[in-house]
Image: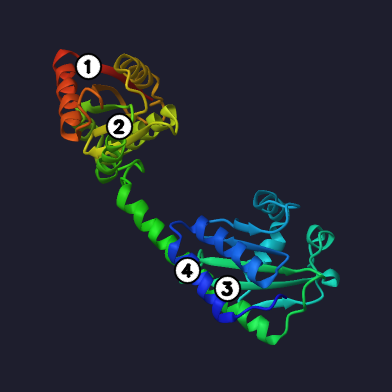
Amino acid sequence: MTNFSDGFLFEQIARLLFEAETVKEAATATAAKLREILGLHRVIFVDTYTGSPRIIAYAGDEDFTAEWIEDYFLSKKEELHHLLKLTQPLFIHDYIHHEGALKAFVETGSVSVALIPFVGRTKSELGLITMHRNAQTQPWDETIERILVAVAQLIFMGIQRLYYLEEHQRLLYTDELTGVGNRRAFMLDMETHLSAKDPFCLAIFDFDDFKSINDNYGHLAGDFVLQKVSNELQRLLGIEHKVYRLGGDEFAIYYASDQLTEVENVLQRLISQLDLSSLGEMSFRAGFSLGYASAQESNWNLDQLISIADKRMYRQKRMGKLDKEGRS
């Protein structure tokens, strides 16, 4: 164990947690700082906030990676779940001869291990920081152990705050029904792309006579069709492009190309590929009207961009519909 000031340690960790914008960033930075200041062999952060245990950060020699450790733990699920049930810190001073020692860690130099758990307000808010010491560093005494526990709790509280912020952001910018971006996310993203003068096209589309689906099959069926169409479109488009629900049955697509002909051809082809085969007993013909506009032709102005795409969509609606048959 290297000489250090506990006040300096807490100051450094608190600063990293304050500056971090994501859970991953906070966990990675604090794990590296713990290892640096305390002279640790390796530091591993485990949490269950996303539903199942995952490694959110690893700081150590290049003999392991976070991905390798996660795979290793997954192959030993019983051991990991047992560790996540800890409610009190556990310090294993003679890790080499401990019955629960993992061979991979022993073979790569771990001689002592601190297991410090965190239990949040719900059963899914579980965390575990494991800190490993090798033979080249000074053994831990009671003072050091108290510091390790205190700094681990500080880190967990900081990470928990970021999880809540990330969830708040997700709810703020995600359409609750479909899971795609909502109008707020759309406006923010459009302003960002327009300010950067990114080459892209906006497509706006809605269903033709969506009311008939609600009238004939009920609003739950209508909701299911909206979910199916938006998620199928996002899947077909891939991560480079993005689908938003603007409200009701109206959607927008950010397409990362400013070639209108290409965008129109691609999107009309994708609409025709929508798989509506899992709509239960429903049988209907879903018509869509689409309008397109490039950022450049709008002179990088959001109101103009939406206006051009809207006018073209309603022109298509008047001239004829792009149909997609949904049939069980």
Callout in the foreground (1, 4): 4
Q: Position of residue 304 (x, y in %)?
A: 16, 30
Q: Position of residue 307 (x, y in %)?
A: 15, 28
Judge left or right: residue 291 versus residue 238: left
Q: Of the numbered discs in the image, which one, if any, rests on residue 152?
A: 3
Q: Position of residue 327 (x, y in %)?
A: 35, 23
> Which of the two residues, 218 or 169, is positioned nearer the viewer here?
169
Which residue is found at the position 31% from the left and 30% from the top? 253
Tell me if mark 3 has few (under 14), some (14-19) or many (20+) residues whose alpha carbon lies within 10 angstroms of its own. Answer: many
Residue on which disc 4 sits: 15
Judge left or right: residue 139 versus residue 122: right
Which residue is found at the position 29% from the left and 17% from the top? 260
Mark 4 near mark 3, Cβ–Cβ under 8 Å? no
Tell me if mark 4 has few (under 14), some (14-19) or many (20+) residues whose alpha carbon lies within 10 angstroms of its own. Answer: few
Which residue is found at the position 44% from the left and 30% from the top? 238
Q: Of the numbered discs in the image, which one, if any, rests on residue 72?
A: none
Query: Marks 3 and 1, how far apart in space?
Result: 60 Å
Mark 2 near mark 3, Cβ–Cβ under 8 Å? no
Q: Vertical placement of 74 versus 192: above or below?
A: below
